[in-house]
């Protein structure tokens, strides 16, 4: 009996615990559209359907990593990557740095190959929600929003090769 109990305790201790990633709301609305500008003298318009939107995260604001999958603009200026969007490597309750970026969807997730690019400022999130919550932590706001832990809409511009090819 003691040997069976001892074995059961060892097995229970050695079973890895499943880590749950922290989650955010990776979306915007028609009230907080991403914009696009072809050139310095061109008008600013809603970013076109097909524009890629990526979420970058990190524990250091100067070292952010792209989270996959990215989202694609579903209406001009509007994207929806999910109400509960897990960020691998994070934990519920953790605050992290994030920024949004947009680029030409024809290059897929290879944003550094795009001739157009734009990004939000980097913000530190409020504590991330667990996957069991009905929605992730809100990290986006309108252009007139004043919440310090939420990103604002940005403008993607046709800028030429800003980034070296990897």
Image (spheres, rainbow, N blue to C red):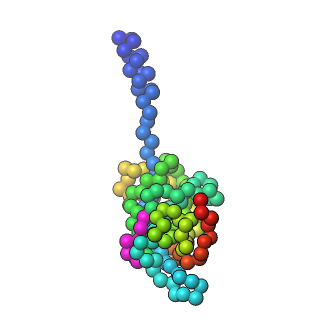
Location of residue 124 with respect to 116 vertically, above or below:
above
Instruction: Locate residue 10: give its quadrant.
Output: top left
Question: In the picture, which quadrant includes the C terminus?
Answer: bottom right
Q: Is residue 145 visible?
A: no
Picture coordinates of residue 24, whole percent (x, y)? 45, 58
Name the residue: 47% across, 75% down.
Answer: 34
Decide which of 22, 46 is in the foreground and name it.
46
Q: Which residue is drawn at 62% across and 70% down?
A: 162
Residue 38 shows in this picture: yes
Residue 135: image location, x then y, percent: 38, 58
Q: Give the range drawn in magenta.
A: 71-76
Quarter of the image that includes the N terminus: top left
User: Is residue 130 rendered to the left or right of residue 147?
Assistant: left
Q: Residue 111 versus residue 91: which sits nearer the camera?
A: 111
Secondary structure mostly seen in the magenta stretch:
strand
Residue 82 placement (x, y as % from top left): 38, 61
Residue depicted at x 59% and y 75%:
160
User: Which image quadrant is residue 14 in?
Assistant: top left
Q: How many labels does the image show?
A: 0
Quarter location, residue 165: bottom right
For residue 50: magenta?
no
Where is residue 131? Give x, y as percent. 39, 50
The correct choice, above or below, for 116 with respect to 126 in the image is below
| Outermost residue, right side | 62
């Amino acid at each position: 009996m003691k040997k069976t109990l001892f074995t059961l305790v060892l097995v229970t201790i050695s079973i890895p615990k499943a880590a749950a990633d922290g989650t955010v709301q990776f979306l915007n609305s028609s009230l907080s559209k991403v914009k696009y500008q072809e050139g310095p003298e061109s008008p600013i318009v809603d970013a076109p359907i097909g524009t890629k939107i990526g979420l970058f995260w990190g524990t250091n604001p100067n070292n952010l990593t792209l989270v996959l999958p990215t989202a694609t603009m579903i209406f001009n200026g509007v994207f929806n990557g999910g109400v509960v969007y897990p960020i691998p490597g994070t934990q519920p309750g953790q605050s992290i740095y994030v920024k949004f970026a947009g680029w030409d969807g024809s290059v897929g997730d290879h944003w550094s190959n795009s001739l157009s690019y734009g990004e939000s400022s980097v913000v530190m999130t409020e504590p991330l929600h667990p996957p069991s919550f009905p929605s992730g932590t809100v990290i986006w706001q309108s252009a007139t929003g004043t919440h310090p832990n939420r990103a604002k809409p940005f403008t993607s511009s046709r800028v030429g090769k800003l980034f070296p090819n990897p």
